[in-house]
Amino acid sequence: MSLSPPKFLESIRIANKIPDNLMYHQQRLNRTAQDFGFPAIDLNDIASQISVPDFEVYKWRFLYDEYSYFSDIQLYIPQIISEFVLINQKKFTYPYKKTNRCFFDQTKGKLTQHTEVIYYANDYITDSSYGNIAFFTGEEWHSPEIPLLHGCMREKLICEAKIVLKNISINNLAIYKGFKLINALLGFEEAPYYPISKINFPPETEI
């Protein structure tokens, strides 16, 4: 039996005492369990045992792997972001939501507190460290065809036809008016909107 913390993670929004979008989190958990060869845990069973003290928004971190699982629940406090920087992720991939975030910590560790990373590979945007990303043309929202992680809120927005998947080049970002970060903790409508000018374009920034 492993004494290490569980390897995988689901970050789930609890609003008005109800966990949001459990279907999408369960689907991702099921894929992870199948790929790594262990039985999937039923999030609805775990959710039935969880309570929060009020109707604020809470972050439910569900950590799990083949050996163990546990929940951690904290009041959700959105990050304050003032600027963004592009960083070349090179060969880094992140197909599963893991508790090990060394790559993200390493890249963000070089930046100021309120600066967020937007990653790209082969000149195409993939993700931010905070979540998926969607760019606004003035008429529709575009999100990268190939993200670092297939986020649950992103999947929901695709199913609702609120975002369109595109290959988004760092060389063509000027065609967009602005963008939002997408994650499971923050509703798309309430997520902050950032003008495209908030993204800094260094000549070559990479880890």
Image (tube, rainbow, N blue to C red):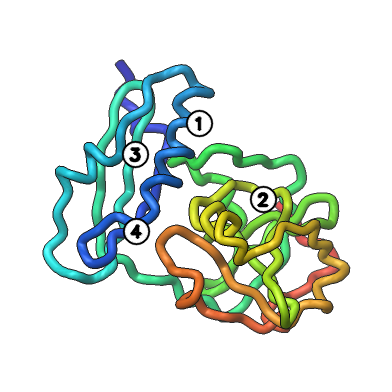
Q: Earlier in the sequence, mark 3 or mark 2?
A: 3
Q: Do the residues under discs 3 and 2 have CB atoms within 8 angstroms?
A: no
Q: Amino acid at mark 1?
A: Arg
The residue that mark 3 highlights is: 63
Judged left or right of residue 52, residue 142 is right
The residue that mark 1 highlights is: 31
Task: Please give the label number shown on residue 147.
Answer: 2
Report the residue at 25% width, 48% height from top. 72
Q: Earlier in the sequence, mark 4 or mark 3?
A: 4
Report the residue at 70% width, 62% height from top. 164
- The residue closer to the viewer here, 146 or 23, is 23
- The residue closer to the viewer here, 25 or 110, is 25
Secondary element at tag 4: strand
Q: CA distance from mark 2 to mark 1?
A: 17 Å
Secondary element at tag 3: strand
The residue that mark 4 highlights is: 13
